[in-house]
Amino acid sequence: MDCVQAADAIATSVDKLGRAVSTATDDPTRLNESLDEIDRELDSLKDKTDNADLSKAVDDLGKGVESVRTAVRDGDATPDIKPVTDAATEIGKVCTP
């Protein structure tokens, strides 16, 4: 998977995460499913880059995902996903030709 495809897949997953957060009280499992999707995209991108900016954005996205997971585990039904969306936006910028 190339950078542009990965960025697009991550953007789609982050969008799903946003929708999952907004409906978390109805279906909390969607949050974890969305986070799992983002993790899979990150795994596919992590080992395929030598771009320092992309590596930092990927690391930031991973930290954001972990922060959301922790908040959900601690009972927060509406965690702050801004770090996730910010990092995904940065990946999109870095991966745009």
Image (tube, grey):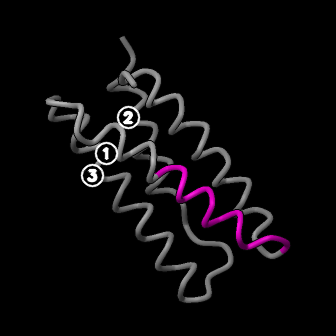
Q: Is residue 78 left or right of residue 57?
A: right
Q: CA distance from mark 2 to mark 1?
A: 7 Å
Q: Residues at badges 3 and 1 in contact (C-beta under 8 Å)? A: yes
Residue ID for mark 3: 59
Question: Which residue is denoted by mark 1 in the rendering?
Answer: 58
Q: Amino acid at mark 2?
A: Ile
Inspect the magenta stretch and tell me whether residue 88 lies in it. no
Q: Nearer the viewer, residue 96 or 27?
A: 27
Identify the image quadrant of the N terminus: top left
Residue receiving disc 2: 91
Q: Are marks 2 and 1 in contact (CB under 8 Å)?
A: yes
Q: Does residue 4 sit above or below 13 in this rendering?
A: above
Residue 43, percent across and down?
35, 46
Image location of residue 57, percent across then percent down: 30, 43
How many circles with numbers are drawn on the protein? 3
- The amino acid beneath tag 3 is Asp
- Does the magenta stretch mainly form a helix, a strand or a loop? helix
Asked which secondary structure carries label 3, the reply is helix
